[in-house]
Image (cartoon, rainbow, N blue to C red):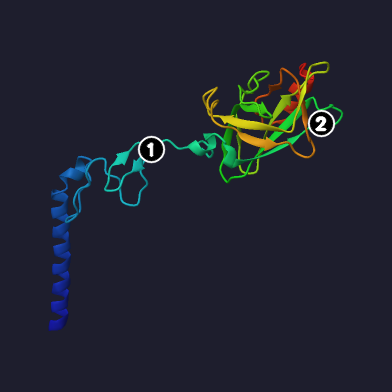
Amino acid sequence: MRTVRKSGKTCTLGIMAVAALLSSAACDSGGADRGESPTPSGTPAASAGATPSGTPSPAGTTARPGGGEGTPGTSQSPGSGSSALAACNDNDLSIDTSGWRQDSGRHLLVTATNLTDQACTLYHYPYVRFGTDIGDPIPPTGSEPRAVATIGPKQKAYAGVFVFRAGQQTRTVTSFSLGYQDRAPGSNRDVASLDIRLSDEVGSLTVGPDPRVTYWNTDLSAVEDFLFRSGNS
């Protein structure tokens, strides 16, 4: 019986202790009544503006090492780097020459193929000189294309050359030199050009007094349209 009474007394005391604790908490909860959330004991209050651990930073900001936020950098799209705009040069290209059937050799097609693993740009028009000519390159004909001729690995660009017109005084050559411009029009004019022997298909050229060359273009049909449909035949 003593044990039972002791047990009952202990239970009663336990209930009274819990009630006292609840009453004390109610008296101290003035902050909660004012709409403030209490801070658990032993846990420091979060500073204003802090981002909880594991929660992504707001969109449009980039977390910096050591904390803080910064403005995200400008991204570059593929091919917009400097390598895509670098001017092609002799070491980048393979040059081939060809003509058109039933054209009587009045036009020459120059095909440039990119042999590298990086894109490069053929700016404006090629510098073309025939045979042993060391003077100014032949002038361009027509208007510049709307887009520059940027070619990736194994891609091609084209330039057409009007060579002579029937009835003109001509000379025969078996080679020509080819030079390339940078972004600035007329650049590299005095740089030594690469001598290129005409392909076996072409053999030799009959060159008149006023040959012209088109601007570089990645669209072969556009070059052909200009050569054969705009009075350059």
Compared to 87, does 118 lie above or below? below
* Amino acid type, residue under disc 1 in the picture: Pro
Whether residue 162 is visible to the viewer of this picture, yes or no, is yes
How far is mark 1 from mark 2, CA to CA? 54 Å
Horizontal arrangement in the rendering, residue 25 relative to residue 56 (left or right):
left
141, 224: nearer the viewer: 141
Q: Earlier in the sequence, mark 1 or mark 2?
A: 1
Identity of the residue furthest to the right in this view: 102
Compared to 178, does 115 lie above or below? below
Q: Position of residue 25 (x, y in %)?
A: 16, 53
Q: Residue at x 59, y 41 (%)?
A: 92
* Amino acid type, residue under disc 2 in the picture: Trp
Q: Position of residue 2 (x, y in %)?
A: 12, 83
- Name the residue that disc number 2 marks: 100
Answer few, some or many: residues within 10 Å of disc 2's Cα (few below 14, many 20 plus, some between 14 and 19).
few
Q: Residue at x 67, y 36 (%)?
A: 196
- Asked whether the beta carbons under mark 1 and mark 2 sit within 8 Å of each other, the answer is no
Secondary structure under tag 2 reads loop
Q: Position of residue 68 (x, y in %)?
A: 28, 42
Secondary structure under tag 1 reads loop
Mark 1 or mark 2: which is in front? 2
Horizontal arrangement in the rendering, residue 31 relative to residue 73 (left or right):
left
Answer few, some or many: residues within 10 Å of disc 1's Cα (few below 14, many 20 plus, some between 14 and 19).
few
Image-quadrant location for residue 146: top right
Label ID, residue 72: 1
Q: How many marks?
A: 2
Q: Residue at x 61, y 22 (%)?
A: 135
Q: Position of residue 129 (x, y in %)?
A: 65, 27
Compared to 10, does 164 lie above or below? above
Image-quadrant location for residue 206: top right
